[in-house]
Amino acid sequence: MVPFKYVQWDPERHGAKTSTFEQLFDLFQQLLQYTAGDANEALNWLTQLDERYSLTDSEMGIGDFIEELKARGYLRENDGSIEITAKTERSLRARSLEEVFRQLRKGGTGRHPTPYEGKGDELLPETRPWKFGDDPHLLNITDTLSNSYRRGGLEDWSLEEEDYVLHETDHQSNQSTVLMIDLSHSMILYGEDRITPAPKTAMALSELILRRYAKDTLDIVAFGDDAWEVSIKDLPYLQVGPYHTNTRAGLQRAREILRRRKNRNKQIFMITDGKPSCHFDQGRLYKNVFGLDRKIVNKVLDEAVICRREGITVTTFMIARDPYLQGFVRQLTEANHGRAYYADLNNLGEFLFEDYVRNRRKRLH
């Protein structure tokens, strides 16, 4: 057995120590994801963890940590209660992006590549003659000067229109995406927390688009008994409700949003445990929580076909392992000609971003 050798901490060799504030703040952000953005509950849990595991030290206690959060603009008081600020919301999105996207850093350059030549930022070795209106940043200077020298030589050097040569580029497209999040009661049943990764993934996706894909659009739709839009800033506060699962209403709302978007490429990402259990029938909510009701299922499949006809791809991220529910997702995917990922709770975000950034077109079963 190799003995351990303990030495004094050397910042140059071992790196700077993480401060108590940074350690507490990281844990506080994790707790906020489990409390749906409730700062009071998260701080209460943090206090209990400190009492059990001695997280704080003589320089910073929980009270000092709270005051430091206020001083740095992460917390504010409102009618005697403590709330997180917009700065904290941004921090949560950035943290989610770092956590979910950690394994994919070696991916693309921050655009959606396609297999086509056309307008884009990725220069290709192939060239073509210049045309009026072309972007001068694509100019191939070496070949342009060579053409000029061959034509007139050094003594009578000049540049003519026929000398100019440009690089070809990979065409890169824009996307309009609607992310659907299932907030039905089944997302917390059966001893599994299926809801916490969903807002985390949505926050990471929103931060990714804000940072790298400025021309893309992202809209969030939550669905339970009905479907409603959620703003990016409200993502940390999403909670499961006493809802059934109206998948049809969610798809309808997503289609309505995408009709307003001008981007040519449109898609829906849906995070769900897969079981539609209600829909509106002549203005009344028809529901059946037992098994897969064909009356409900067929309406959802009809909506998937409508999405396909409107050029909207539906990618379903299934976070339950029941074979009969996976069977429904396969029917949905076939009706839409879309994609389905049968991911567990730990790799949900990784699969989502790998598909979004690389624009892969394959099904995982």
Image (cartoon, rainbow, N blue to C red):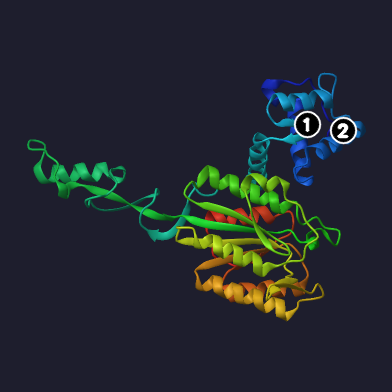
Q: Amino acid at mark 1?
A: Leu
Q: Residue furthest bottom?
A: 294
Of the 4 image quadrants, the one containing the N terminus is top right
Relative to the observer, which residue lies in front, 73 or 344?
73
Give the residue number, with chain letter if any, for mark 1.
24
Q: Position of residue 220 (x, y in %)?
A: 62, 54
Q: Residue at x 57, y 73 (%)?
A: 336
Viewer-nearest of discs 2 and 1: 2
Nearer-N-terminus badge (2/1): 1
Q: Quadrant of the C terminus?
A: bottom right
- In the image: residue 200, left or right of residue 219: right
To which quarter of the image does residue 226 belong?
A: bottom right
* Residue at 76%, 41% in the rendered image: 32
| Mark 2 element type | helix
Residue 240: x percent and y percent? Answer: 77, 55
Residue 360 in view (yes/no): no
Which residue is nearer to you in this view: 360 or 4? 360
Tell me the tag on residue 47: 2
- Of residue 218 and residue 17, the one placed in the foreground of this image is 218
Q: Residue at x 64, y 42 (%)?
A: 93
Tell me if residue 210 comes above or below residue 114 in the rendering: above
Q: Does residue 320 appear in the picture of this structure?
A: yes
- Amino acid carrying label 2: it is Thr
Task: Give coordinates of residue 344: x percent, y percent.
Answer: 74, 59
Number of labelled discs?
A: 2
